[in-house]
Image (cartoon, rainbow, N blue to C red):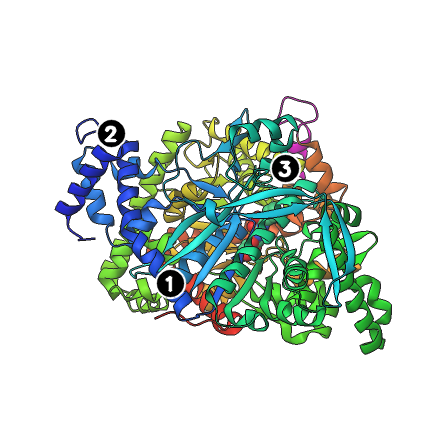
Amino acid sequence: MRNDFETFFQLTKEKLENECQTTVDDCTASDVYYAIASIVKNDLIGDWSKTENETNNKSAKKVCYLSMEFLVGRLIENNLINRGVLNIAKETIQELGFEPEEVFMQEPDAALGNGGLGRLAACFLDSLASLRYPACGYGIRYRYGLFQQRIIQGEQIELPDYWLEQRYPWEERKFEEAVSVHFGGTVRTSTHEDGKLQFDYEHTDEVLAVPYDIPITGFDNEFVNTLRLYSAETPSPLGDPVTCEDVAYYHELGHEHDITQISGYLYPDDSSYEGKRLRLKQQYFLVSASLQNMLRSFKENSQRTLNEFHESFAIQINDTHPSLAIPELMRLLMDQERLSWDEAWKITTQTFAYTNHTTLQEALETWPKEMLESLLPRIYMIIDEINERFCQSLWFDYPELREKIPELAIIADDQVKMAHLALVGSFSVNGVARLHTNILKEQEMKTFYTLFPDRFNNKTNGITHRRWLLQINPSLSSLITDAIGPKWIHEPQALIQLLRYANDAPFLQQMDEVKRENKRLLSEYIYQETGMTVDENSIFDVHVKRLHEYKRQLLNVFHILHLYNELKENPQLDVTPRTFIFGAKAAPNYYLAKEIIKFINVVASIINNDPDVRDKLKVIFLENYNVSVAERIIPATDLSEQISTAGKEASGTGNMKMMMNGAVTIGTLDGANIEIRDLVGDENIFIFGLRAEEVQAYHNNGGYMARDLYNTDPRIKRILDQMHNGTFGREERAFKDLYYNLLYHNDPYFVLKDFDAYIETHELVERAYRNRGEWTQMNVANIAYSGKFSSDRTIQEYASQIWKLKPLL
Ligand code: F58
């Protein structure tokens, strides 16, 4: 595309007329959005097929990223930046009488993920394309993304997220590449003419997996990868496209509903893992369709033999959710391609790599044996055989581990343990931050680590600095580029050069102004969303992430209440004004998490309406936290709350996004916070609280009594009593369950234990913030050292150390 305004404007005009049936005078923001998306799509389509053809022609190895979640958010601005036309698109929009933001907002925020795990997958796709690695993301095209959250009288209400209501311009339906996925039925065993066993499946339910492809553009290159999302549809009995009669026929059987449910909605829960049949169906649907697609493409395009499949594909499984891919590849290689078990196993175990994202026991997936066996009989047979062979090898090759076999087995107590399947069937298993990987090796997966020491490796997470700095914080990005040149956009480690400016007063002054402006913009948004005005000079103290007890939003609220109580007692107290900003969704069935949301909102309403503290404290809960809301909040953050119970947050990625935008972290030594601290040094971060080893020691040996703290620390007693005696709710029972959990269940996430250290550390924050010059220096240091947390670095490590993948130049 010619990158000049005239051409772009002319193209937009033509699109409006030809595709939107409107004119430059009558068009709406939505028309302009579709017109511009269409220009970008046309512009990239040639590069898209070129990328695919080149990958095939050069027999280049490709990585396939299998994930139940891709939290992509909006693509329009990202694509305009990547294709180098953002500024002329903005000019065009303004010429047509609209604000760019108004037009970009027309795109639905694709919320096909819950949080960090899904967003990581999206950042990885961005880096893969930007670094020219052949790659494909495989996921599900959920008709409903993560629920939309409304807060009504302080409580979370979930509404369906029907994001496909209007046409989604980025996707391409590829019906000709649809494949069938089979569920249920029975397996008949016989002897094939080649003398090997033959497995035939009878009376199965067939589901059609129809791919929808989304282009993933690289930054400032002509590289375009694919995100392939599968939709579940009813197959036509004749194998032809579905007709009206077929639909009626299936409808009658209630079939269609069951089938389309498979890509119906995204599951929002990891507070406890319950075997849900529909989720199991989703997982198999995803992996079966993806693997059939890979095999088909391999046979069509590759000169290699099947034994070399792993030279063409590396498959990364994002947590255990897609781990049925392991038995599925075995099935396809044996039953369809007629390879022997040993041949198939060799290929499979050279192909798969598994990433773990959690050590929370309750979040580890297991499936009831009967459920798996009845839904996927052949897959169950294969898992059973993998398990049998694994246990045999333990028995014969590791006699010292014999007593551990029940603990290590894939199938035990009538449950199938997906993490064990993933560990046995992959050549690599990685954690997502140094501490997390060490916990896997030394605690959670200790015996597996002694068995397979070479499989374990760490890949500290990263985020794409192009979206999370360049796109969302244009004024800071310009300031950085003016100071150190544009190299950082391609090589984020170059941000380190900003250290040269750490003592440059005019630069620090400009940094401060940028932050102020970003805070002003966020204040406007807060006003628009909540009707609340906030003090732009206050500390913007931000806690945004999924709501989970281990993330300890409750600890944050206790700090707020502590300040409130202090101010009520002594209204003259000299505190720097603070605006506490929360954003969080709770899984709909996670009762305590929803109570915490309610608690935050009740505390907010008391504080915000109390004239005694109104100028000093404000508490804002922004509803429906999602990628787009994060994009507004992060550039305006002063203080980044990363206060999980040590050992529980695998990595965290919000911590990285905030750091990269200059925020200073208050956090525990958990996940990637540790690596942030290692880089910026203790002088540029506020660390407090129990360490992971201490938390573990309390778990193992006891020795912590929450009640003792209640009895000895009057600040804690005051807050808990308020929670319990109705101060924060008219109902007699208000927040008693949170209270009971702390006192009677002995504070499982050590909120009270870390309270004192947290309060003290916040006092240090306040002191530091008052010294504007020093605070801004901390901001600079955080940005300067954030290069390591670019997903480009993470992807280069995966590519060279796990996938053995080369960029296509
Ligand atoms: C997150 N997991 C980790 N899970 O909590 C976070 O520390 C890490 O940085 C991130 O992965 C990326 O590695 C996470 O987001 C989920 O969203 C669950 C997935 C399964 C359904 C319930 C939510």
Which element carries disc 3, helix, strand or loop? helix
Q: Which residues are magenta?
A: 717-734
Classify 347 as above or below 46: below
The picture quadrant where one finds residue 27 is top left
Q: Does residue 277 appear left or right of residue 585 in this picture?
A: right
- The residue drawn where x is 30% and y is 62% is 221
For disc 2, the marked residue is: 21
Q: Earlier in the sequence, mark 1 or mark 2?
A: 2
Which label sits on residue 125?
Answer: none
For disc 3, the marked residue is: 719
Q: Can you tell which of label 1 and label 3 is closer to the viewer?
A: 1
Which element carries disc 1, helix, strand or loop? helix
Tell which of 442 and 507 is nearer to you: 442
Whether ligand 1 has any atom under 8 Å from the Cβ at mark 2 is answered as no
For disc 1, the marked residue is: 53
Tell which of 391 and 108 is nearer to you: 391
